[in-house]
Amino acid sequence: MDERIVMVDSGTGLGITQGQLDELSAAAAVQLRRRGVRTGDTVLICLPVGPGLLVATDAVIAAGGTVWPVPAELEAGSLREHILASRARVMISDLPHALDAADESRVRIVVSLPDLRADLSAGEPYPLGGEMCTQSDRAGPRTRED
């Protein structure tokens, strides 16, 4: 496994190695395919800049999707406009305001990456446990399936 650091989270100081990025991206790509992402599908990504955004972007590309980044800091109206313009069915985000903005869009699956707060600087592997959480029926109550 390649131990070269490819990104350091400025908020936490935690780094992600090339090997960890490859493993997480591959696992996330499998989850996206299981949830119906196919070649050419547009997938919204609304995450703050950091390792999660990098993993999500790599995973969408690996699954054959087209990445449509949406800045996490946009105000609600602009965020909703971006989401509607994308015509995407899938969004990767765990931000409450992004979930709210997607309410009246075509987004039917919301995927959240696993918690990425492991202490990477101590050589701990990036957490791979657990599948990405989804909220698959946007019209119904907000629940997450594991």
Image (cartoon, rainbow, N blue to C red):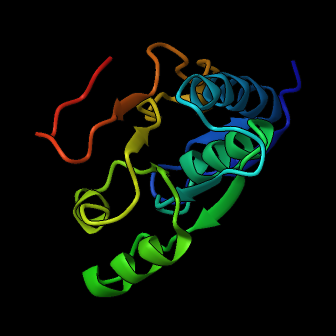
Q: Is residue 126 left or right of residue 80?
A: right
Q: Residue at x 47, y 58 (%)?
A: 47
Quarter occupied by the N terminus: top right
Q: Is residue 16 left or right of residue 141?
A: right
Residue furthest left in the image: 141
Quadrant for residue 80, please give it: bottom left
Give residue 129's position: percent from left, percent from top. Answer: 48, 13
Quarter occupied by the C terminus: top left
Q: Residue at x 44, y 15 (%)?
A: 130
Quadrant for residue 105, please give it: bottom left
* Foreground pick, 12 / 88: 88
Q: Is residue 2 above or below residue 38?
A: above
* Foreground pick, 117 / 115: 115
Give residue 107's position: percent from left, percent from top. Answer: 40, 54
Give residue 98's position: percent from left, percent from top. Answer: 32, 63
Q: Residue at x 56, y 42 (%)?
A: 14
Give residue 67's position: percent from left, percent from top. Answer: 68, 59
Q: Is residue 105 left or right of residue 17?
A: left
Q: Residue at x 41, y 51 (%)?
A: 93
Q: Is residue 18 above or below residue 43?
A: above
Q: Is residue 139 left or right of residue 9?
A: left
